[in-house]
Amino acid sequence: GLGFHTDAFEQLGDDIDGKAGPNTWMDFWTVFYWGWWVSWSPYVGIFIAKISKGRTIREVIVASLTGPVFYTFVWFAVFGGAGLRMERNAITDAC
């Protein structure tokens, strides 16, 4: 598991997929990512403000922290487990 990934990481060098090619997307994705979040942040703020009307600041902070953390935990538990199972099956099947 871990040894394979560390060996593969050394072999990749600067190329993300181990192949030489145009890096246009890899050079630009960070700008795209931050631009996306900056453009959506006002809408998210307005949405949270509207659904939080009549609640205390403490309730809003607790709800906006615990909900995403719980969702992320469940997401990684489900898809991480599925990914690990696929990895183990690929190793045993000698793919």
Image (cartoon, helix red, strand yellow):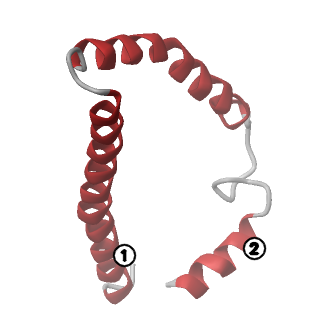
Mark 1: secondary structure: helix
Residue 35 x %, y %: 59, 18
Residue 23 x %, y %: 73, 37
Left or right side of 44 for 32: right
Q: Residues within 10 Å of mark 1 (few under 14, many from 20)?
A: some
Residue 89 x %, y %: 29, 80
Q: Quadrant of the C terminus?
A: bottom left
Label pair 1/2, CB-CB below 8 angstroms: no
The three-letter amino acid code for the residue at tag 2 is Glu
Mark 2: secondary structure: helix
Q: Which residue is depicted at the point 34% across and 50% down?
A: 69
Q: Quadrant of residue 53?
A: top left
Residue 38 x %, y %: 56, 17
- Which numbered tag is attached to residue 39? none
Residue tagged 2? 10
Q: Earlier in the sequence, mark 1 or mark 2?
A: 2
Along the viewing direction, whichever of 40 and 49 lies nearer the viewer = 49
Residue tagged 1? 87
Along the viewing direction, whichever of 74 and 88 lies nearer the viewer = 74
